[in-house]
Image (cartoon, rainbow, N blue to C red):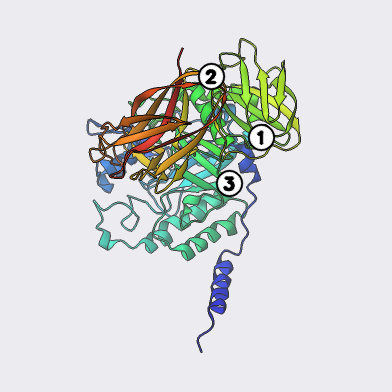
Amino acid sequence: MRKPFCQIFIGLVGLLTAHSSSAAPDSTWFRDAKFGIFIHWGLYSELGNEWKGQSYYGSGEWIMNRAKIPATEYAQIAGRFNPTNFNAQEWARFVKESGARYLVVTAKHHEGFTMFGSKASPFNIVEATPYHHDPMKDLAVACRTEGVQFGFYYSQFLDWHEPNGGGNTWDFPQSTKNYKTYYAQKSIPQIKELLSNYGRLGLIWFDMPGGLNRDETLKFMDEVRQLQPDCLISSRVGNGLGDFRDLGDSELPPHVIDGTWEALFTHNDSWGFVKNDFDFKSPREILHLLASTSSRGGNLILNVGPDGTGRIPETSQRFLHEVGKWLAINGESIYGTTHSPIPDQPWGLMALKTNRLFLHVFARPNDGILFVPGFSASAKCARFLADDEPLKTEQHGDDLKIFLPEELPDLRDTVVAVDFTGTLRDSWRNRPQIISRQFDSFSVDAAKGDPAGATTLDSVTSSQYFGNWKHDTLARNMKNAKDKLEFSFRFLEPGDYRVALEYACSAAEKSREGIIEVGEKSLGFQTLLTGEYNSHDPLLFIRQNIGVIHIESPGILPVTVHPKTDGTELFWFRRFVIEPLR
Ligand code: FHN
């Protein structure tokens, strides 16, 4: 007699739980850390994205794949890989002094070369290079000495050196591959070596999963748990599993994300070292990324790519040192914080720690008054975190005003700490967008709007150089007049304001008519061509001035954008740009 479904289901859960019997480790340290450093280092660092006189742009760690270099030819690079500039203490101190609390370094990337001593593959740094030494041993010890949590990145499936590994079909036809053999002979044995020979690991960062179903992935995770029960496993272990979630490369979420998660960015445009890539993010940009991920409840891991000799790029050393100096003064506003209950504001964003709200001021309003809407608690006092200078406050209901002096202590990010009693209600959803005359312009992203009709809000991926992904949250599928995106704008001051739209528009959409309604007023427009979409190319946007509106008095107004008539898609809408006219 066939068992009723519930009995079958209970059996299945029994099986799965049987496999993933070991509980998930405590990730409090990870959530409190907020900031980590990622290091991509391998044979590709020796090439610096150049092969046989040709320069490649974008992700340098993919050169073997992009140049379709035969594995036997690529392996010869090991013969000249000799990182004499590698100094584990310097690397650990670099991480420490950057203010980061954990380090993740590539033990093996897709190229298949093993950056540690391994019995599972002779293609490793100890046996196959003139260096004949295991740098990961030194680094694990040095990080522990500096009190920096240590973890490994391991490409568990992609391995272009191995016939049965994932990814290399230019040497090894897909039909000949047996992934299970690769897992059994290299991947799993090496992961066990990493979990057995380098002391306690805080996390293991898997990437580009493949070749395993959910049950096999659970067993795979158990291999890790059995050796190091406290080691956190990244979500790119696959099949929706993992102890913390990694977003897409270079993806910053437009709003709060619950749970334990990490955003990952490169310091320039590549993970691996690239000789001609000097597009480094400034200390200010890194601080804004860090404050943004904290305000949304997550971590930032920032990557640097040392060269083949083991030298971390000078600009990365200098810029991360600057970040560390800022964190030495303002770290309380990042470490151990939780997401802000109040969304981003024209002047910056916030992060919370029990009854203290940290305001990260990226731009001083012209009148020096920080306006904080939705402050549902009772503010007790405000001060600059850097020097405790008290700041005058005024609160009217949920509107809090903080009066800033002429000069801000730090033009990159000045932190104001506000102590309060009571509760700050979460107001990320349906909070009016503040528009005033205290800044030159205001960006209101599509993600802040509410889709109506068939309108959707989608995260759209595009890329500039290879592997340098960009993510935009766009309003799409606006075809009929009822397909709208709805906002509410709170104008703090009357006056004239220019309304502009930023969007992408393909040939199929161009010259469609659209309407913007601001309260009773409406502005008509016709879409202009920007180009076709392809995820491997840049997605280009136009900022089109639509018209001027006059706001009689302060207040909240409904604002919508939608097609004028039914028809083809209007465009892919990115944001409003509102400019007070003077
Ligand atoms: O292919 C890799 C890439 O080389 C790099 O390691 C990044 C880091 O997150 N992960 C993969 C692309 O998403």
Which residue sits furthest front? Answer: 520
Q: Which numbered disc, 3 or 2, marks the residue closer to the eye? A: 2
Q: Residue 33: x and y, percent?
A: 62, 37
Q: Position of residue 443 (x, y in %)?
A: 46, 27
Within 10 angstroms of label 1, few (less than 14), some, or many (20 or more) residues?
Answer: many
Give the spatial CA distance, label 3 vs label 2: 38 Å
Residue that mark 3 sits on: 258
Left-right relation of 400 to 262: right
Q: Nearest the camera: 351 or 577?
A: 577
Helix, strand or loop under label 2: loop
- Label 2 belongs to which residue? 494
For the residues labelled 1 and 2, the Cα–Cα distance comes to 32 Å
Tell me the SS state at disc 1.
strand
Q: Is mark 3 within 8 Å of ligand 1?
A: no
Q: Is residue 36 left or right of residue 145?
A: left
Which of pointers 1 and 2 lies earlier in the amino acid sequence? 1
Does 198 appear above or below 335?
A: below
Which image quarter: residue 365?
Answer: top right
Q: 518 or 439: which is nearer to us?
A: 518
Going 24% across and 51% down the picture, which residue do you hit?
170
Q: CB under 8 Å between callouts 1 and 3?
A: no
**x and y percent of residue 160 in the render?**
32, 50
Residue count near mark 2 (Cα–Cα under 10 Å), binned few <14, some 14–19, many ≥20? some
Tell which of 347 and 538 is nearer to you. 347
Residue 206 position (above or below residue 40): below
Pointer 1 residue: 352
Identify residue type, mark 2. Pro
Q: Would residue 92 be seen by someone viewing this image from the given angle?
A: no
Q: Taking 206 as reference, is 105 above or below it? A: above
Amino acid type, label 3? Asp
